[in-house]
Amino acid sequence: MPYAINQGIRIHYQVEGEGPPLVLQHGLFWSMKGWSRVGYVDALRTNYRLILIDARGHGASDKPHDEAAYTLPQHVGDIVAVLDALDLPKAHFWGYSMGGLFGFGMAKYAAERVNSLIIGGAHPYGRRLPAASRPDGTDPEAFVGAFLQRMGLNRAALSPAEEAELFDNDFLALAAALLDWPSLEDILPAMTMPCLVYAGELDGAFPQVEACVEQLPRGSFVSIPGVNHPEAFYRADLVLPHAMKFLQAVVEG
């Protein structure tokens, strides 16, 4: 099982396929396995060298319980450490939700390592969570319940596999990772790499996600119809045609 090391923290990654390198970064609560489970890896691996990364606190990566371990520069450092371990000076980057925020972080702290960005369900305008959305991690049921409420999801609508994946977590690590995020709005005009930004039209953050594209020099926006925040990841059939068209244009351009 391959790992990269960033300041003593082990970051698990996996490589699939051949072609131009493309980092895939998952969202909070999930792991790299989601990209395979819902069909992204099978669709992309024939044309791209996929670099799937378990964010710290998730999957098979280390899971510190200290909030100080989860700043955005550290997350960016984890991605850079994986690229370094693979001797890759640059890669395309695709992140969803928390992973999308990491994409803005890459643009701010490691833009020289990015060929292009695909950012789904994330915006750069900062996040401040109310106390009710910040369980301390000692009660997994309460943590999952708060997460589902924030996402506007009904637990009964989850498949057994989705529910099992939610509970297969270190909740003290997730509680530490659930930080307020600073605004990165200042970086938007300097993001000169090609950018595709998308969100489900029923995502509560849709207006902010759409608005940020207006400040991107080479940005485009796609609305995914009829889906909420999690569904805009699960519905790979709706997302992949836009992403693959974008990537093909960037690679061939």
Image: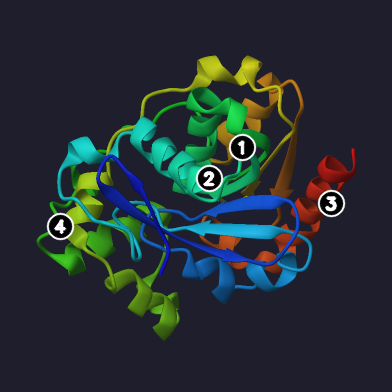
Horizontal relation, residue 34 to residue 153: left or right: right
In the depicted structure, whether residue 188 falls above or below residue 47: above
> Mark 3 or 4 closer to N-term?
4
Q: Amino acid at mark 1?
A: Pro
The earlier-in-sequence mark between 2 and 1 is 2
Residue at 27% of width from left, 67% of height from top? 169
Separation (CA) of disc 3 from disc 4: 40 Å
Q: Earlier in the sequence, mark 2 or mark 3?
A: 2
Residue that badge 4 annotates: 137
Image x and y of residue 134, in percent: 20, 47
Cα–Cα span, label 4 and label 2:
31 Å
Is there CB contact under 8 Å for labels 2 and 1? yes
Name the residue that disc number 1 marks.
89
Which numbered circle lies on residue 217?
none
* Label 1 to label 4: alpha-carbon separation: 37 Å
Res. 69 image quadrant: top left
Who's the residue at 36% across and 60% down the image?
Answer: 29
Which of the two discs, 3 and 1, sits closer to the camera? 1
* Cα–Cα span, label 3 and label 1: 24 Å
Of pointers 3 and 1, the one earlier in the residue sequence: 1
Quadrant of residue 89 within the rendered picture: top right
Q: Residue furthest right?
A: 253
3 vs 4, front mark: 3
Q: Does residue 152 sit above or below 90 in this rendering?
A: below
Residue at 48% over, 64% down = 32
Closest to the observer: 144 or 47? 47
Q: Residue furthest bottom?
A: 160
Q: Which residue is mark 2?
A: 83
Q: Is residue 204 visible?
A: no
**Type of amino acid under label 3:** Lys
